[in-house]
Amino acid sequence: MRSAPTILHLDMDAFFASVEQASKPSLRGKAVVVGGLGPRGVVATASYEARVFGVHSAMPMAQARRLAPNAAYLVPRFALYRSISDQVMGLLRSLSPLVEPLSLDEAFVDLEAGGTAWDERSARLAGAKLRADIRAATALTGSVGLAASKMLAKIASERAKPDGLVLIEPGTERALLGPLSVRTLPGVGPATGDHLRRAGIHTVEELAEAGEDELVRLLGKAHGHGLFAMALARDERPVVAERETKSVSVEDTYDVDIHDRVRVATEVRRLAERCVRRLRGAGLSGRTIVLKVRRYDFSTLTRSETLRGPTDDPAVVREAAARLLESVDTTGGVRLLGVGVSGLADYTQEDLFAQAAGVDEEVSVPEEPEVSSATASRTPPERRWPAGHDVRHTAHGHGWVQGSGLGRVTVRFETPGSAPGRVRTFRTDDPALEPADPLPLVSRGPGEEGDARAGGGAVAESR
């Protein structure tokens, strides 16, 4: 383990919820919960104001609503979150070539490898500058941990939350770790934690005192050796610049089980299209198509088909997913569907279109009309109004959906740079109201500033 605290761990504070608060002035300082809003939805992120009521990530949304009935409940805007994450990761890569992203809002950085820090003082300066740069670029806050190892840097960032910086000085690690729960250590989940608790081991200090032989007896050779080393604050894991993407997939959970086989097939085709868009967006192709089906009784089935070579052709993926569906019994109903592509590569083979059964390379597949026909009895996708998503009205400017139902949609008109705006209600089919792209959280130039001011002016007039 190195002798200077030059490994940095960044964790953005309540990332999804913080993005929503930054983009919606009326929600700043208030409880915000982001996630699936249907009966089977779960919480993706809760703001710190919502956490006061006991709401947390992965909690069923129905439970969150009981705990915090007055919170704002919003549907995620993943495209926006990814774009902001790209900005943050760019700032991290300016510090070092060794950046290890763990998720959209979390990453390790080896500051020493980038020549950014070499001792305690330079590491602290780098961490403070990073936090300031993130705030300037995104209007968001992140918590920074600095230490001589990845394990300790992550512990430090947890102690820094929210919006802080904690540096663990070399030589103080054992004293810091001793009283902490064994669950603090990487690799100690609920099952391992419960196993250790039954053995009378609750803290990291007790873990170290138990000795390596006892831990090997309790947990097995690999796990026992690893945990004993971590209990002694030994963590030699390097920061890995890139984690190889092993698969690309999308899935949807349905509020009501789908029983109609035609509807199931339509949903699989739609998911295949989404999966290919994500695949192409990453500049990848893949050989193995995977279908995931969770049935009414919570049993989950997966089927896969491996092609002759990698593809990113939507027709190929659609047809493969349809063939896989033929082998799955959906009679009792389906609650979740997913389509994925694995065996990834960064190239395609031109002749793979022929793998789509019955599809001629020169014939365009009438995908959209078929989907439109199958969904004619439902609200067209372009006229759905997810809570929290952006809209624009020809008279009132930019706003976001507070809620919709019974043929009405309620919109609050405000922008990231405006004062809290006024709420108005429209028919869901109002031709003056359209979905819109999110506005930048921070104005980048005179044109964008003018757009934000125009939105704010419209809000002021509507008051």
Image (spheres, rainbow, N blue to C red):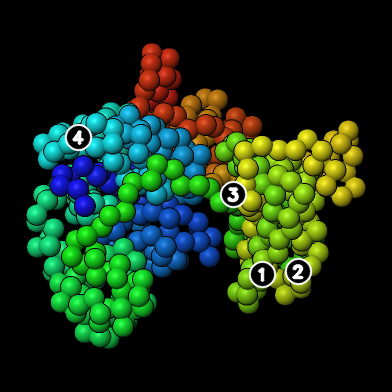
**Sequence-earlier tag: 4 or 1:** 4
Q: Which mark is residue 328?
A: 2
Tell me residue 61's x, y (percent): 45, 63
236, 371: nearer the viewer: 236
Disc 1 packing (10 Å; few <14; some 14–19; many ≥20): few
Q: Is residue 76 above or below residue 94?
A: below
Q: Are marks 2 and 1 in contact (CB under 8 Å)?
A: yes
Residue 193, by quadrant, is: bottom left
Q: Residues within 10 Å of mark 2 (few under 14, many from 20)?
A: some
Which residue does the image show at 27% across and 46% down from the upper left? Answer: 9
Can residue 40 be seen at all in this image of the molecule?
yes
Q: Which residue is mark 4?
A: 117
Given the current orientation, which residue lies at the most extreme top position? 446
**Labelled pair 4, 2 in contact (Cβ < 8 Å):** no
Residue that badge 1 annotates: 301
**Left of 96 or right of it: where is 282?**
right
